[in-house]
Image (cartoon, rainbow, N blue to C red):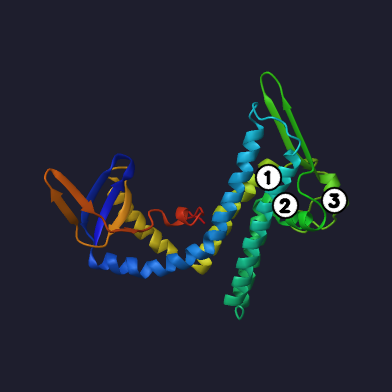
Amino acid sequence: MKLLGLNKARSNLHFFRDLETNEIADHERFTPIIAEARNRFNLFRILGQNYAEWKSYVDSLLNAKTTHDGDEMLQLDRLLLNYLTCAYTIQEHFKVSFQRRFRKDQAKQKEYSDFINGLCKVSWPFAFFLDFRGHVQHCGLGIGEFHREVNATSVIVAITHDATKLVAENNTWLRSKLTGKEGKLELVTLLEEFHGRMLQHYAGYVAKTFFPELFSAAEFYNRLTEEVRRADPDFRMFFHSKELDMKTEGDKQTRNLHLKLVPNDVFAELGIVVTKKN
């Protein structure tokens, strides 16, 4: 099996070397782990796509050329509901998985609760959206007020909810401790931080808990990717599973490739952000 770099845009291909025996063994060891993780972490990729749709629509409202069609509130509510439903699904999925895996380990059970409580303490938006999801499910849709003003030099968009109204409609804000004195809540800004916390801190905790081997896998594939990209920063790293199959007809040479798709950035391809500090 060989290490290969491919830049499709420039039709640039380069075989670097044969993989060492221990590298092939590591690849075979990591492959089923990454496959299982990818299946579980697809939830985060769906969350990312939901957020991208929300952000794209919000950005379109900031474009002066976007025409007003009267359905802006409906679309914002739909996109926010899709996002919050997916975020809740992720948390329920891994909370139940955690309970099943560590059902006889009270210390581990407490560790998960402490992690969520700690994240709520350092990030009020994270705490707020954990509570807000319940409000949207039981009390009312998520967008309280929408305002858009277009003039000759600027576009002003406000997507908010009023804390006083939220507390009046629902007095259960266990994590965020919403009092009603917070005034207008800027939902776009708050959701941006919540999303970052979900993809980095929450996903990082899940990765460490359920798939600790991913960190070794990431280092392994990153090292090989860096080796390939030293030759061309735009190379994608592949493994080539057979000997090079080349045919020459006159002055034309063709190559039959047997590319094996392997991760270049394990965590990014799982749809999450993980650093050493996670």
Q: Secondary structure at mark 3?
A: helix
The amino acid type of the residue labelled 2 equals Phe
Q: Residue at x 66, y 41 (%)?
A: 189
Judging by the rendered image, the residue that carries numbered circle 2 is 128
Distance Cα–Cα, label 2 vs label 3: 12 Å
User: Most extreme residue toward the top, as rendered?
Assistant: 152
Q: CA distance from mark 1 to mark 3?
A: 18 Å
Q: Quadrant of residue 222?
A: bottom left
Residue picked out by circle 3:
167
Label 1 with label 3: CB-CB less than 8 Å: no
Counting residues from the start of the chain, the first of labels 2 and 3 encountered is 2
Nearest the viewer among 262 and 115 is: 262
The answer to whether residue 234 is visible is no
Residue 252: % across, % down = 16, 44
Q: What is the x, y in percent for residue 220?
A: 34, 60
Q: Tell me which amino acid carries mark 3.
A: Val
Q: CA distance from mark 1 to mark 2?
A: 9 Å
Q: Position of residue 95 (x, y in %)?
A: 63, 68
Residue 260 location in percent, x, y?
32, 59
- Image height check: is 35 above or below 162? below
Type of the residue with mark 1: Leu
Classify residue 133 as left or right of residue 108: right
User: Does 210 sit left or right of 166 as displayed?
Assistant: left
Residue extending farthest to the front is: 250
Single out the residue that lies furthest toward the left: 250
Q: Pointer 1: what residue?
A: 190
Residue sitting at x 75%, y 56% = 131
Question: What is the crowding at mark 1: few (fewer than 14 residues within 10 Å), some, or many (at least 20)?
Answer: some
